[in-house]
C-alpha cells in the first residue's frame, strides 16, 4: 500500500517547525477521547451511520479513527520517516463497500474526522501559536487529500469486483434456469422474479465484414444493456452476448402477450443493433415454464430467419406452419437431406428461401434478391433438376420449406 499522501513529494512531508510539533504533541493524550466523540456523536449525523451495528461503531470505526489520529501525529513528529501507511483505511473501505455503505457516507466520515482533529488543534493552540496552527492545518489537509484518494480508490475497486461477482452469479442462475440445470423455483426467486413472465429471445447479426473483437463485443453488450434498462426501467433479467440472448420481463396486465413490449424493444434496439434485429416473445405462467418458453422463442427467431421472413418482431402466429414443419421426428433426416445436392450452392439456397417467402412470385423474388426475373427462373429450374423437388407443386413446396427449416438446426 502506498505510504505517501503527498503527490510529488516522493514519500516526504514538509518538516513542521518545532512549535507546530509541540502543539501537535499536546493532542496525543486526547486520541481516545476524540475517537469516542467522533464515533458516538459526530458520525451519528451522517446518513446511514446510525443503522450500523454497535460493534462496528465501537470496534472497527473507533479503531480506524484512532489509527488515523495517531498516524497524523506520528507524521508531524517524524515527517521524513515511515510513520505508517493506509492499509487499515483501505481494509475498512473494502469492508464498507461489501456491507453496502454509500461511498459519500464513508468519505464524509473521513472529512468529519479531519474537521474534529482541526477543532482539537485549535482548542490546544495558545496565543502566539497561530503560525504553528496554520502549519498543522496545511499538513492535515494535504494528508486528508491522500486518505480520501486511497479510500475512494479501494471502495470503487471493491464495489466493481462485487458488482462483477453479482452479475456473473446472476448470469449463471439465469443460464441454469433456462437450461434446466438449476431448480426453477429457486432461480426464479433469487432473480427477483414473481408471477407470470414474458421470455424474449434477441438476435442481432453483426454488420457484414465486421471483425469480432473483445473490446467491440463488450461495448456492444453494454449498449444493448443500456437500451434495455431505459426501455424496461431495469426490470428485465438478462443473459446477453454480442449476438443477442434472452431476457425475462414481468408480464404487464395491459400487455399480456408482450406485443407492445416487443414492438417497443424492436424500435429501441435498432438504434444500437441495426435494422436486422430479430426478436420473439413467449409467455411463461410459472417458473417451470421458463425453459420451454425460452426454447420456443429461440425457435421462432431461428425459423423466421430460415424461411426468409423480414427482420423485426416475430410471433408464433407468424410461423405456425413453419414451426410445425420444423419439429424433429423419424423423417427429419431424410427431409433435410433433400437439399444436399445444393448444399454447396448458397445462391440456390437463398433463391429457394426467398421464393418461398414471397409466395412463388418470381418478380418479387427477383426484386428482393436484386436479380433479373429470368435469372430467378434459371435458378429455380436448376434447383428442381438437382434435387428432384417440383417447387411449383404444393407437395414439393412443402417439402422444400420443411427441408430448409430442418437444415437450419444443423451445425455449420
Image (cartoon, helix red, strand yellow):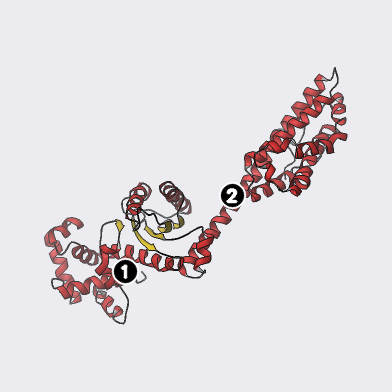
Residue 47 visible in the picture:
yes
Residue 134 picture location, percent across and down:
77, 23
Q: Is residue 18 left or right of residue 275?
A: right
- The earlier-in-sequence mark between 2 and 1 is 2
Residue 194 picture location, percent across and down:
47, 59
The reply to whether the C-beta atoms of the residues labelled 2 and 1 are less than 8 Å apart is: no
The quarter in which the N terminus is drawn is: top right
Residue 208 visible in the picture:
no
Mark 1 neighbour density, 10 Å: few (under 14) some (14–19) many (20 or more): some
Q: Residue furthest front?
A: 253
Tag nearer the camera, 2 or 1: 2
Q: Which mark is residue 392?
A: none
Q: Is residue 74 left or right of residue 377?
A: right
Residue 280 picture location, percent across and down:
34, 60
Dot 2 falls on a residue whose secondary structure is helix
Residue 358 picture location, percent across and down:
18, 61
| 159 vs 39: above or below | below
| 7 vs 123: above or below | below
Q: Is residue 53 left or right of residue 341?
A: right
Q: How many marks?
A: 2
In this rendered view, identify the residue nearer to me: 352 or 309. 309
On the image, numbered disc 2 is attached to which residue? 160
In this rendered view, identify the residue nearer to me: 90 or 207. 90
Dot 1 falls on a residue whose secondary structure is loop
Q: Residue furthest left?
A: 374
In this rendered view, identify the residue nearer to me: 363 or 154. 154
Query: At 28% from the left edge and 75% from the top edge, which residue is drawn?
Result: 336
Residues at marks 2 and 1, CA–CA distance in whole angstroms = 40 Å
Query: At 49% from the left edge and 67% from the top edge, which residue is drawn?
Result: 184
On the image, numbered disc 1 is attached to which residue? 408
Amino acid at each position: 500500500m502506498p505510504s505517501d499522501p503527498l503527490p510529488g513529494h516522493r514519500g516526504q512531508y514538509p518538516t513542521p517547525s518545532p512549535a507546530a510539533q509541540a502543539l501537535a504533541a499536546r493532542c496525543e493524550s486526547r486520541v481516545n477521547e476524540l475517537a469516542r466523540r467522533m464515533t458516538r456523536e459526530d458520525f451519528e449525523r451522517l446518513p446511514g451511520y446510525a443503522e450500523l451495528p454497535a460493534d462496528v461503531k465501537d470496534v472497527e470505526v473507533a479503531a480506524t479513527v484512532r489509527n488515523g489520529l495517531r498516524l497524523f501525529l506520528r507524521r508531524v513528529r517524524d515527517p521524513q520517516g515511515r510513520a505508517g501507511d493506509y492499509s487499515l483505511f483501505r481494509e475498512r473501505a473494502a469492508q464498507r463497500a461489501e456491507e453496502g455503505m454509500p461511498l459519500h457516507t464513508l468519505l464524509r466520515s473521513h472529512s468529519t474526522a479531519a474537521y474534529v482533529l482541526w477543532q482539537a488543534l485549535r482548542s490546544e493552540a495558545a496565543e502566539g501559536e497561530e503560525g504553528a496552527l496554520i502549519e498543522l492545518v496545511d499538513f492535515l489537509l494535504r494528508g486528508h487529500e491522500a486518505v480520501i484518494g486511497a479510500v475512494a480508490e479501494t471502495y470503487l475497486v471493491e464495489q466493481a469486483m462485487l458488482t462483477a461477482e453479482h452479475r456473473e452469479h446472476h448470469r449463471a442462475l439465469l443460464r441454469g434456469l433456462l437450461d434446466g440445470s438449476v431448480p426453477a423455483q429457486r432461480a426464479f426467486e433469487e432473480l427477483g422474479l414473481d408471477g407470470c413472465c414474458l421470455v424474449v429471445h434477441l438476435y442481432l447479426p453483426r454488420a457484414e465484414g465486421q471483425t469480432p473483437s473483445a473490446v467491440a463485443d463488450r461495448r456492444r453488450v453494454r449498449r444493448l444493456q443500456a437500451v434495455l434498462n431505459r426501455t424496461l426501467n431495469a426490470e428485465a433479467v438478462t443473459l446477453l452476448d454480442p449476438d443477442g440472448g434472452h431476457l425475462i420481463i414481468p408480464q404487464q396486465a395491459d400487455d399480456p402477450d408482450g406485443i407492445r413490449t416487443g414492438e417497443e424493444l424492436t424500435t429501441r434496439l435498432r438504434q444500437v443493433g441495426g435494422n436486422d434485429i430479430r426478436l420473439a416473445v413467449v409467455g411463461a405462467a410459472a417458473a417451470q415454464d421458463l425453459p420451454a418458453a425460452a426454447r420456443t422463442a429461440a425457435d421462432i427467431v431461428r425459423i423466421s430467419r430460415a424461411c426468409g421472413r423480414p427482420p423485426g418482431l416475430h410471433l408464433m402466429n407468424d410461423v405456425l406452419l413453419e414451426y410445425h414443419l420444423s419439429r424433429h421426428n423419424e423423417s427429419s433426416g431424410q427431409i433435410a437431406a433433400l437439399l444436399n445436392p445444393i448444399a454447396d450452392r448458397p445462391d440456390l439456397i437463398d433463391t429457394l428461401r426467398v421464393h418461398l417467402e414471397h409466395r412463388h412470385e418470381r418478380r418479387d423474388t427477383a426484386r428482393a434478391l436484386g436479380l433479373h426475373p429470368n435469372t430467378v427462373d434459371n435458378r429455380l429450374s436448376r434447383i428442381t433438376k438437382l434435387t428432384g423437388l417440383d417447387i411449383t407443386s404444393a407437395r414439393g413446396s412443402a417439402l422444400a420449406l420443411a427441408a430448409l427449416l430442418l437444415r437450419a438446426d444443423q451445425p455449420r
